[in-house]
Amino acid sequence: MKEMIKVALDAMGGDHAPGEIVKGAVDAVNERKDMKVFLVGKASRIHEELKKYQYSDQQIEVVNAEEEISCDESPVEAIRKKKDSSMVVAMKMVKDQTADAFVSAGSSGAVLVGGQFIVGRIKGIKRAPLGTVMPTAKGVMLLIDAGANMDAKPEYLLQFAQMGSIYMEDVIGIKSPKVALVNVGLEEAKGNQLVKNTAPLLKECKTINYTGSIEARNIPYGDADVVVCDAFAGNVILKLEEGLSGVLVSQIKEGMMSTLRSKIGALLVKPALKKTLKKFDASEYGGAPLLGLNGLVVKIHGSATAKETKNALIQCITFTKQKINERIKEEILKKEEA
């Protein structure tokens, strides 16, 4: 019998909850027989959605939680006061090891706060960064930190690089991933004080394949597999990429529909174009893991559909089976003992 990876899914988080979230869970267990999903939230609403589908009742279980955390609430206050919220109940399942992982499309701030204070950081980890897998011309890369720590120190970025390397090698399958530090130029003399103080630490680290600085314009070309920065720069890069991708897709579609000739051409290139654009669909890559915690916490977009939810759940299987947390613990312990 296959080992069952257990995931606590916040069924009430996100713009399309619980409908799309529940559908994503059903799609995931119908595709993978080695996972069990706990749908956490208002049981009556979840059961109403589940009636629409066929699935193994051995792989989906509903856990009731009557409260919800909205995006306009203070994350700290919400996590502290709403003990019966779907997010808090689900995260406590990870803390208590009832579940291996937690996935949510809910409030980003609450996920970050809950991850730090409920699930807790691995001993030796100074800060837990958000790692987002993004498409490039050569495949994918990991942007870390993509939104968790707006103010960072050099030693934080060093750990981000170490954790990001482990993730890309063991989860994505890239051997000896290239690590680069976001900068405004390639020369070592350039950059702010954070970058100048971080570069020597990355260069001296023997457990990562550090290749130097990377400018933002080179990130989409796939010049690095792990792109390291503080969360302020990372979130700007992430949001710009998402916006630009949306604009380009919209403009391409508009151009193809502008004349009769272009419409005929569109029919000819549609299969190839569809395949290419799929590579730049964020929902294909699952969610963004909050690395360095005692359990797996994954944030998906607030607008997540069933497809993104399903992919994030399946991503949890790989993360757990590859024992990423154990690898991170070993790496940090090795660094402390050196």
Image (tube, helix red, strand yellow):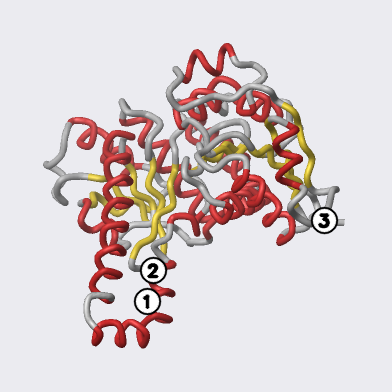
Q: For the point 70% across and 36% down, which residue is it?
A: 45
Q: Estimate how packed mark 2 is, as few (under 14), some (14 to 19) or many (20 or more) residues with alpha carbons within 10 Å.
A: few
Q: Is residue 161 left or right of residue 39?
A: left
Considering only order in the chain, which callout, 3 or 2, is on the residue closer to the N terminus? 3
Q: Nearer the viewer, residue 90 or 50?
A: 50
Q: CA distance from mark 1 to mark 3?
A: 38 Å
Residue 122 screen position, x and y as percent: 57, 28
Q: Secondary structure at mark 1?
A: helix
Task: Find out whether the residues at labels 1 and 3 contact each other: C-beta distance under 8 Å.
Answer: no
Which residue sits furthest front? 260
Q: Dot 3: within a 10 Å radius of its alpha carbon, few (fewer than 14), some, or many (20 or more) residues?
A: few
Q: Is residue 225 above or below residue 269?
A: above
Can you name the residue that lies furthest to the right here?
A: 1
* Residue at the spot of label 2: 277
Which is closer to the viewer, label 2 or label 3?
2
Q: Amino acid at mark 3?
A: Lys
Spot occupied by residue 223 in the image (x, y as percentages of width and height): 29, 61
Looking at the rendered structure, the kind of residue marked 2 is Leu
Determine which residue is flagged by label 3.
2
Mark sitting earlier along the chain (1/3): 3
Residue drawn at point x = 48 percent, y = 61 percent: 174
Residues at marks 2 and 3, CA–CA distance in whole angstroms:
35 Å
**Horizontal arrangement in the rendering, residue 240 relative to residue 58 (left or right):** left
The residue where tag 1 is placed is: 273
Q: Position of residue 335 (x, y in %)?
A: 48, 35
